[in-house]
Image (tube, grey):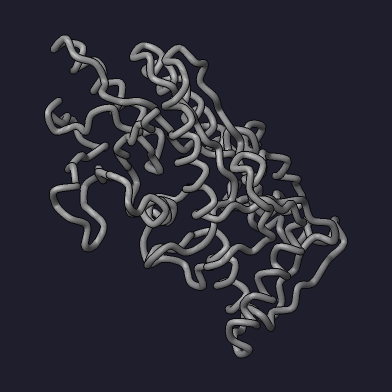
Amino acid sequence: MTKTIHPILLFGATTTTGAACLELAAGRPVVVAGRRPPPGWPGERFLAIDLNGTSLPSPEALPQNALLVSFAPIWLLAPFLAALHDSLGGLGRSLPLAAVVACSSSSVITKRFAANREDRRLVERLLRCEDSLEATCAKAAIPCRILRPTLIYGQAGDRGDQNLSTLLQMMRRVPLLPLPAETGKRQPIHGRQLAASALHLADGAAREPADTASLRIALGGDETLTYTTMLQRLQQAARQRDPLDRAGRCRLLPLPTGLFHLLAAPLLPITAKGFEAVLRMEANLAGFTPVHSLLGTEPEPFPVAPLAWNPPSRSLGES
């Protein structure tokens, strides 16, 4: 029996994870959709779509029987796909997709009971868009998988994360970093691991019946470690790369919980979100599905290479 080769319709190709996805999908038919193509990407395999805009692509421009894989913000993808479905329906046509895999965020879980309004609104927005995307796929009879990744990091091509690279930058700037004596657990996931998971799920979903229930998967890396251990591993990697890297020489200073809270308190009247982010160092933000159990591969210890050593100069769309 001949295996069906589905083209991939990729949104968010200019994010770190999107760049990793392009590397992993080398040799497969891929059409990149977005406002601009990645550097050097052939024009005949690029579909100009602005998810912020109101114009929709023509039915003829869309690859047929494609796997839609998206690392773009789900609050942009969900209304776009809903509008495209309605537009095609008015023409007596349907979405030409074999499966949809989109990225949301583990924030829908970890920030659900946040004290600050901004984070609670984010959770509401993410859930509303997840519901919308699932509803559109259900109406179109397309299998849907929504990934909720946690703490994305790493480098792919010239694209780097804004999470752990920011911590490295901070450790370069300060000689001493106070931390609570007991920090919570983390489960960072490399952009390449997330991209591999998305492709794996898209291929699997395309083989399933159209009426298969959608899935929302909270996804993390293969290793769960404390926030302090995570920083220590980053410092070790920095020293191995460059013994003179100042991030590796920053002293991590554990403080009694009460004293740490007292030092963080001045943040509260300035930025409630920032204050809560500092306190989350003590929270366990782990326990998600590890990548290796999804892919059936050997676990990869943290940190997975390559790392991003400096934050990007502008936002690249990572959550």
The foreground one among 269 and 245 is 245
Count of numbered tags: 0
The foreground one among 165 and 61 is 61
Q: Position of residue 148 (x, y in %)?
A: 55, 37
The foreground one among 254 and 296 is 296
Residue at the location (42% across, 15% down)? 210
Quadrant location of the N terminus in the rendered image: top left
Q: Quadrant of residue 39?
A: bottom left
Residue at the location (49% across, 15% down)? 212
The foreground one among 278 and 51 is 51
Q: Quadrant of residue 143?
A: top left
Residue at the location (63% across, 53% down)? 188
Residue at the location (26% across, 46% down)? 32
| Direction bottom: furthest residue | 244
Q: Position of residue 164 (x, y in %)?
A: 57, 62
The reply, left or right, for residue 197 in relation to residue 115 is left
The reply, left or right, for residue 24 in relation to residue 270 is left
| Direction front: furthest residue | 1
Q: Is residue 69 depicted above or below 246 in this figure?
A: above
Q: Position of residue 59 (x, y in %)?
A: 15, 25
The reply, left or right, for residue 246 in relation to residue 105 is right
